[in-house]
Image: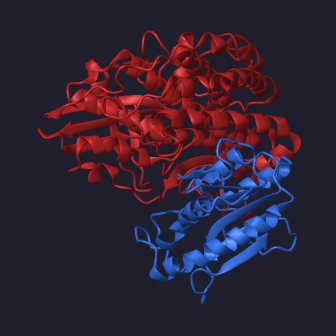
Amino acid sequence: MLSYFTGSPGTMAVQPVLVVTCGNRDRADDGMGAQIATALAARKLPGVEVFDVGLNPARLILESREQRAALIVVDAVEMSGCAPGRVVEVDLLADDRPELVSEGRASSHGFGLLDQVELLRTLDALPPIARLVGVTVADTTLGASMSAAMRAALPKVVDTIAALALRRHA
Amino acid sequence: MSRSNKGRNETRTIRVGALARVEGEGALHIEMKDGMPDAVRLEIYEPPRFYEAFLRGRDMHEVPDITARICGICPVAYQMGACHALERALGAFNMIDPPIRTLRNLFYCGEWIESHVLHMFMLHLPDFLGYESAISMAEDHAPIVKQALGIKKLGNELVGLLGGRAVHPVGARLGGFYRAPDEADARALLPRLRVALDQMSELTLFLAEQVEYPDLERDYEFVALCPEDEYPMNLGPIRSNKGLAVEQNDFGNVIEEVHVEHSTALHSVIKGRGPYLVGPLARLNLCSDRLHPRAAELLPKVCESVGRTLPWSNNFLSLPARALETVHALALAHDIIENYERPTRSYVPVEPRPGVGGHGTEAPRGVCWHRYRTDRDGTILEARIVPPTSQNQMTIEDDLRLLAERLADVDDERAALQCEHLIRNYDPCISCSVHFLKLERSWR
């Protein structure tokens, strides 16, 4: 599991924007979460903390209860007919947001990523801005490496998420 | 959730979509005949994972890292079972330095804390307090949930201290750890351990005083490690309240794992006797006199509040048992770290040789027993892993049979909820992952 702090070295102050990625590095394109976290951390974006929860979404609630300005959750999404690497932004707090397939489904002990977001909201620990950034994937074959199309799309995806994070910081 | 309203003489089906607080894939089938349960099956259809098969042919040093992948919640249990059993097979069991044994207990404390707190406050307590989930419970009990999350995080950090990371840790190896933690890193956790210990002590009393426990007494055979001088965790012979007393190597010979048609998980029985129960209730009943003083001082108050003296023979009381064990683990972790000096070596070299060794340790859910046979170059020739949930499965079905008798006049929806509640007493880790439970109850 990766954990990054991208603020000024030597300080551990809570950064206003938290970007959390997730996914299974052993399932082809689903492994893009960890790669995005690595790439974002390397950019040392001011005011932005990044960590990858991998397959352990409970880490979101454990690590992110400090008050922040914005939370950006990055996850793989499947959209039929859509090439890998397309970025879809969903406002997690909007009443009319689309239903997400993973809702009600489980990861470890049935406590998934969106459950964590909802629990944060109940505990008044969810920032006023909470976005799901879905990145479309083409291949989630178990044990496969990331598809060539996904690899090619990744730099642009990172650019898009970095811009989103900086905009939320600004 | 859907249910029919047909009469008792017809088949009725209840479907519970997403039993979201148990691990694995399973269904519950109950057949009622003349108002009594005729057949009760906890159907586990999670695909088999073949760990024992693909461990064969691997090098002995790979085993702790491979077995850690069996479970994201209790990887330490699988690592410790593998290390101890292989050290027995390789003739190194009695060579392990005492400071390394102490660090193994600290490692395990972290796992007990994070696993118990997740189960108690996120998965199980909502049942008792009448909430659909921890999320709805948090609307009324936010301080409790916040405290629990803080304690769980601390447990994760303890696992990370020795394991390098909290999930699927990589720090354990045959003979000890790849690296012993720095004293300063360990001591940095002390202030939060003190706070967590006080909070968990109060939460334990809350669970004892404010929760009403259903009455379901049964005559269980409780099985646990029973070391003479400490509460069970890594070491000790295996004993029961009904006379079972075996050394670690021999445990596999006194139990029998049985394949049943309705489950991909094996069922365990004690040969010639039948089902048994492992887990926090067994440990507490057999070894309460070895709790850390911080937990021991709470025990009389807890017993008074729940209205029962030990031994407890009602597995709904596994909730306060877990709470007491969490206090124990926090206090033990505090003591270990307060007295911690970085050992001169973090592991004892273990050399390959042909051998056979079996050993179980106390996973949060109960005894997790491993047995390995090694070749002269350290290659694994045979592996056997007996996880706690498979050992408890027949006991869960027997519990459900008793509960089903009492639910004959209860509507299907409430019956399903109570059956799920009972299953969660065991914190079952079916895939070591039940996302979906179907309850089918038919009447004949």
Find residue B117 and report its horizontal and vertical position in percent. Answer: 65, 35
* Number of disc labels: 0
Find residue B301 and report its horizontal and vertical position in percent. Answer: 74, 13
Can the viewer see residue B276 in this picture?
no
Residue at the spot x=62%, y=71% of the render?
A158
Residue at the spot x=48%, y=63% of the render?
A25
Which residue is most to the bottom? A81
Q: Determine which quarter of the picture holds residue B353.
A: top left
Question: Which of B340 and B394 lies nearest the eye of the viewer?
Answer: B340
Looking at the image, residue B431 sits to the left or right of residue B434; the answer is: left
Name the image quarter holding the C terminus of chain B: bottom right
Q: How is the image coloured?
A: by chain
The answer to whether residue A146 is above or below residue B172 is: below
Name the image quarter holding the N terminus of chain B: bottom right
Looking at the image, residue B348 sits to the left or right of residue B333; the answer is: left
Residue at the spot x=33%, y=18% of the render?
B97
Find residue B81 and report its horizontal and vertical position in percent. Answer: 37, 34
The answer to whether residue B320 is above or below residue B127 is: above
Residue at the spot x=51%, y=66% of the render?
A31
Query: Chain A takes which shade in the image?
Result: blue
Which residue is most to the left? B376
Which residue is most to the front? A9
Find residue B38 and report its horizontal and vertical position in percent. Answer: 55, 49
Can the viewer see residue B392 in this picture?
yes
Q: Determine which quarter of the picture holds residue B317.
A: top right
Query: Chain B takes which shade in the image?
Result: red
Looking at the image, residue A34 sits to the left or right of residue A11; the answer is: left
